[in-house]
Image (tube, rainbow, N blue to C red):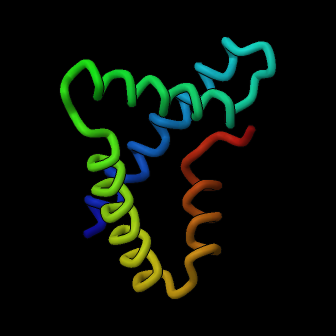
Amino acid sequence: MAEGVRARIDRTARIDRLIRSRARLLPSGSHVVAISEMLADLRHYCDCKGLTFEQLDRAASENYEDEASLNRMVSGHREESKKQACAAHLPLS
């Protein structure tokens, strides 16, 4: 289980770097806008590849909920666990 948690934290850190990089290219520097643009890009990618974004998004949501549920069982407190994971593995804004 620890290996899965480490892999998830590493993936989250990589996503953070991508979002920061994308945000730096925007006039506003907004992470929110960067995420929105990245999601739009994923929708275009799915269209080009004949994939159904909505199906993939539902599967991702289920995966996220499963992981979040596991985090709650392990930590006993979701918000504190999330804050600790973010503080420990992601650079501050």
| Residue under the point 64% across and 55% down | 87
Is 92 above or below relative to 42? below
- Residue 45, x across and y down, in percent: 32, 22
| Residue under the point 20% across and 23% down | 49
Assign the C terminus to one quadrant of the image: top right
Query: How many marks are shown on the rendered structure?
Result: 0
- Residue 59, x across and y down, in percent: 28, 56
- Dividing the picture into quadrants, the one containing residue 91 is top right
| Residue under the point 32% across and 50% down | 7
- Residue 54, x across and y down, in percent: 34, 46
- Residue 58, x across and y down, in percent: 33, 56
Is 26 above or below relative to 1? above
> In screen coordinates, is 81 left or right of 25?
left
Is 11 above or below relative to 77? above
- Dividing the picture into quadrants, the one containing residue 19 is top right
Is 31 above or below relative to 11? above
> In screen coordinates, is 73 left or right of 33?
left
- Dividing the picture into quadrants, the one containing residue 43 is top left
> In screen coordinates, is 59 left or right of 71?
left
| Residue under the point 26% across and 59% down | 3
Name the outermost residue toward the right.
Answer: 28
Assign the N terminus to one quadrant of the image: bottom left
Depth order, front residue of 74/35:
35
Name the outermost residue toward the left.
Answer: 50
Depth order, front residue of 44/10:
44
